[in-house]
Image (spheres, rainbow, N blue to C red):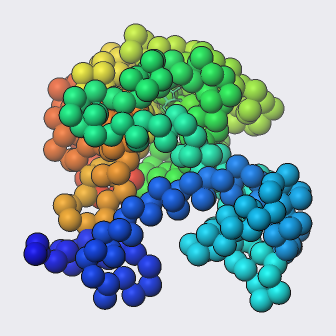
């Protein structure tokens, strides 16, 4: 018999799991797929929107969602087992604080992030994880016959979902990340790979005199222009459709790379960084802000360790530890200007050297 779990890991499982034998705790880990698919189906069927006005019996939810009544009742029972919905004593179902976030009309909602996590573009590469580990090659290209961002262009609906999922996830973390750093002294902030501009909007909202430059692939920048139309912050933004492996606009005193570098292996990440370094040129006061996860200590719950698997499967990218970040940025001509906290999403500030 092997050693018991290190105490630092904690026990993953149902209530009372710590007392269960290892066989039961091991089999519980196979439930991850079931739980995430139940969450995806509840979201895709719009259950949260159907319950937005109050509790309903399963039959009425099924009729509203256009579902088989028996199948939907079984889906709801499983969803209630993990707190996604709650079954009341009279048999009706009601939303919980988790499923409130699946409504299509709530600020700070995560519906598209959940749809993205359960979409074929995320799920199918996972079926090929062992092969990716054997070869070191991303499963995405094998499964779909093209790289991830090409797929987003070939299937515009999937591309829109990718972008809106990033926007939802970004809103969930933006405020906390920006609270942890001071961007006020900067007059012109470039968000490189800035997606549809949610983060840059928040930066400009906090710095009413600053200008912003949103840099992304041309189609994404176009989506940003439409999404942000007529906001006060959009009037202070320049929209630049560009390939960040080729060119990053010069003339800004702050450059932001948020959730970008983890998409790429070291050679490609270094190419992006060299373009940013070239754009900064001789401006010693300019700063690069990297908003990413930094891997934490071993044998502890670390979301970054799982995000790293996503990155390996989809892009051949990686989540990095502090030493890896320092090597990568150092080789591209940057020196650290702060002490980031490992084990979570964090801000790394870099100065040109
Ligand atoms: C994971 S998303 C992060 C988006 C945004 N920074 C955020 O935090 O929500 C990565 C972004 O990089 C962009 N991107 C990928 N390849 C690019 C390229 N070659 N040139 C410019 N942008 C690119 C994608 O379109 C996408 O918006």
- Locate residue 240, reporting x and y percent: 58, 17
Q: Residue at x 63, y 22 (%)?
A: 155
Locate the N terminus by quadrant.
Answer: bottom left
- Locate residue 172, reporting x and y percent: 57, 54
Q: Nearer the viewer, residue 199 or 312?
A: 312
Q: Quadrant of residue 106?
A: bottom right
Q: Nearer the viewer, residue 130 or 320?
A: 130
Q: Residue at x 32, y 44 (%)?
A: 308
The answer, for residue 204, to whether it is visible in the render is: no
The answer, for residue 278, to whether it is visible in the render is: yes
Q: Residue at x 75, y 52 (%)?
A: 45
Residue 80 placement, left or right of 226? left
Residue sticking out furthest to the top = 246
Residue 230 placement, left or right of 134? right
- Locate residue 256, reporting x and y percent: 44, 34
Q: Is residue 216 above or below residue 317?
A: above
Q: Residue at x 19, y 61 (%)?
A: 298
């Amino acid at each position: 018999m092997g050693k018991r779990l290190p105490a630092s890991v904690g026990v993953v499982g149902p209530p009372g799991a710590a007392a269960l034998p290892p066989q039961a705790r091991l089999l519980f880990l196979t439930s991850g797929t079931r739980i995430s698919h139940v969450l995806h189906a509840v979201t895709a069927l719009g259950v949260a929107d159907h319950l937005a006005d109050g509790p309903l019996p399963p039959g009425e939810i099924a009729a509203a969602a256009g579902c088989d009544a028996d199948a939907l009742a079984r889906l709801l029972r499983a969803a209630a087992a993990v707190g996604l919905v709650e079954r009341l004593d009279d048999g009706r179902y009601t939303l919980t604080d988790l499923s409130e976030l699946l409504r299509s009309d709530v600020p700070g909602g995560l519906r598209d992030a959940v749809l993205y996590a359960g979409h074929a573009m995320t799920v199918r590469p996972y079926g090929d994880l062992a092969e990716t580990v054997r070869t070191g090659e991303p499963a995405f290209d094998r499964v779909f016959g093209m790289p991830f961002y090409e797929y987003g262009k070939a299937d515009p609906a999937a591309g829109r979902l990718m972008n809106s999922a990033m926007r939802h996830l970004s809103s969930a973390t933006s405020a906390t990340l920006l609270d942890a750093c001071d961007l006020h002294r900067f007059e012109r902030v470039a968000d490189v790979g800035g997606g549809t501009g949610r983060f840059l909007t928040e930066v400009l909202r906090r710095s009413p005199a600053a200008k912003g430059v949103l840099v992304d692939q041309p189609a994404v920048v176009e989506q940003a222009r439409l999404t942000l139309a007529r906001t006060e912050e959009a009037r202070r933004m320049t929209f630049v459709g560009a390939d960040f492996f080729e060119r990053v606009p010069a003339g800004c005193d702050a450059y932001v790379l948020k959730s970008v570098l983890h998409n790429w292996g070291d050679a490609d990440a270094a190419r992006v960084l060299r373009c940013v370094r070239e754009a900064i040129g001789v401006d010693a006061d300019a700063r690069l802000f990297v908003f990413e996860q930094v891997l934490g200590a071993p044998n502890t719950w670390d979301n970054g360790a799982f995000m790293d698997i996503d990155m390996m499967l989809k892009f051949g990218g990686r989540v990095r530890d502090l030493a890896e970040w320092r090597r990568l940025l150092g080789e591209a001509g940057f020196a650290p200007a702060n002490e980031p906290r490992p084990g979570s999403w964090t801000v790394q500030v870099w100065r040109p050297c």
